[in-house]
Image: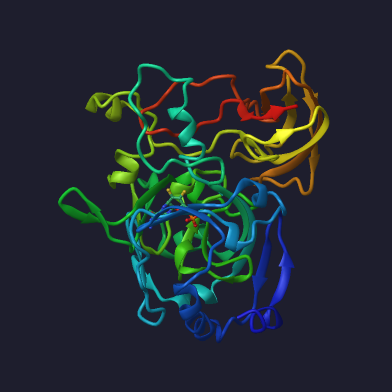
Amino acid sequence: MNNLLPSRREVLLSSGGVLVAGSLKGTVDALSQEVTAAKNPHKDLMFRTTDPRNGEPELTKLVNSWQTPTELFYVRSHAPNPEIEVDQFRLSVEGLVRRPGTFSMADLMKMPSHLTTATLTCAGNRRSEYNSKEYQNVPKVSGVQWEAGTIGNATWEGCQLAAILKRVEVLENAKHVWFEGLDQIQKNSSIIGFGGSIPLEKALVDNGPGAPLLAHQMNGQPLTADHGFPLRMVVPGYIGARSVKWLGKIVVSDRPSPNHYVANAYKIVTKTDPLDWAESGPIYRFPINAAICTPKSGSRLSAGAIELTGYALPTGRSHSQIKDLMISADGGRGWTRGKLIGKKQDFCWQLWTANVQVNSKTTELLLRATDSSGGLMPARIPWNAKGYLRNSWYRLPVEVS
Ligand code: MTE
């Protein structure tokens, strides 16, 4: 794959992404050859569950590079990876459109291709912290007990969703675009696909790095089975749940998808009261977040200056950049400013380092950040039943002697 694609391309720079035009003949064959490798990916992750596959990297490895290697990119799946034959694969596009249709991988690869770098993060990132002693007299939050590793920054390549929607001609009363995955999830007594949904306005973005992509490549290689082979959505700025993997169907509608993962899950709710669920809208954009990745939680440190590294993710909107990144070693009385390092790019995380003095009284390091679009990490956030969007100050316990 690697040696096939670049030589065939005429690469043109567009705002934020790279527009690739020209003949992509042969790439579907190359994709097929990659299937065997993609079925058995080796991942350098800590798997929280293996059936389905749910794993996150050790934080100390995560921030070695701005672009996350696929091996270290978290996996969040609700069912086993479906096995999809590229030759038989068809994406159907229907609903409130003038010309519904189906697209083979060959059709999709003939469309103008875009390359964009974007961070994906799970709404459940840092969920395990909701079960800490900070929250008293509330039910335990169930679900995969994620630490802060369900985040990664990759390059994605594919055609723009806006281009597909232009082909099928969206009708005037359309307001939302639904995505459906080909995985089969056992939910109570039925089998459902994983669904996502985004507002039409976001679906139609066709300039800059915020444009949603139908991606078939990740970090310059065909998607692995874990990451949605052969085709997935990538919706920059939105929680990972909207970037549907193993994409099989797109429906244009006048309302958000009724799929369980839009209508019920991925909402901020505090009770099991159905009214609570009905009143709460789907989560779209991700909020600001940040974590300390080195040293490890619980490290024994010597008093004096220590070096910290980590990531910070600005709110998922255009031109939002990390502004202040502050660390405290004394419970929040004094704060030291961190240094932003590496690339600064829309819809991507920002890596940082900091040099902080610790002493024998230091029991934890605190991290907070703000961004240029008004996002800020609060000291505390209220508990929610599903354990989503945990973005309060990051607290790293340490021992200092
Ligand atoms: N798409 C399908 N079809 N099935 C899934 O289980 N999980 C979603 C999303 N897309 C999911 C899916 C969630 S919750 C997240 S956070 C991202 O995929 C994770 O993408 P990754 O596994 O490539 O990191």
Nearer the observer, 270 or 322: 270
Q: Quadrant of the N terminus?
A: bottom right
Residue extending furthest toward the front: 401
- Whether residue 134 is situated above or below residue 216 in the rendered picture: above
Image quadrant of residue 246? bottom left
Residue 278 pos. (x, y %):
27, 29
Left or right position of 309 against 81: right
Give the x, y percent position of residue 211: 57, 53
Residue at the extreme left: 189
Q: Residue 114 versus residue 276: which sits nearer the camera? A: 276
Residue at the (35%, 80%) spot, across then down:
88
Residue 233 showing in the rendered view = yes
Measured along the vertical axis of the image, is residue 8 above or below residue 203? below
In terms of image quadrants, where is residue 269?
A: top left
Front residue (pair 244, 202): 244
The quadrant of the image that shows the C terminus is: top right
Image coords of residue 63 (percent x, y): 69, 49
Instruction: Tell whether 9 sits left or right of 202.
Output: right
Residue 167, percent from left and from top: 45, 65
**Residue pictured at 50% horizontal, 77% vertical:** 37
- Residue 284, compared with residue 373, is above or below; it is below
Left or right side of 97 for 311: right
| Colour logic | rainbow
The answer to whether residue 314 of the structure is visible from this angle is: no
Number of callouts in the render? 0
Farthest-out residue, top: 333
Residue at x-position 21% and y-position 56%: 191
Q: Which picture quadrant has residue 365?
A: top right
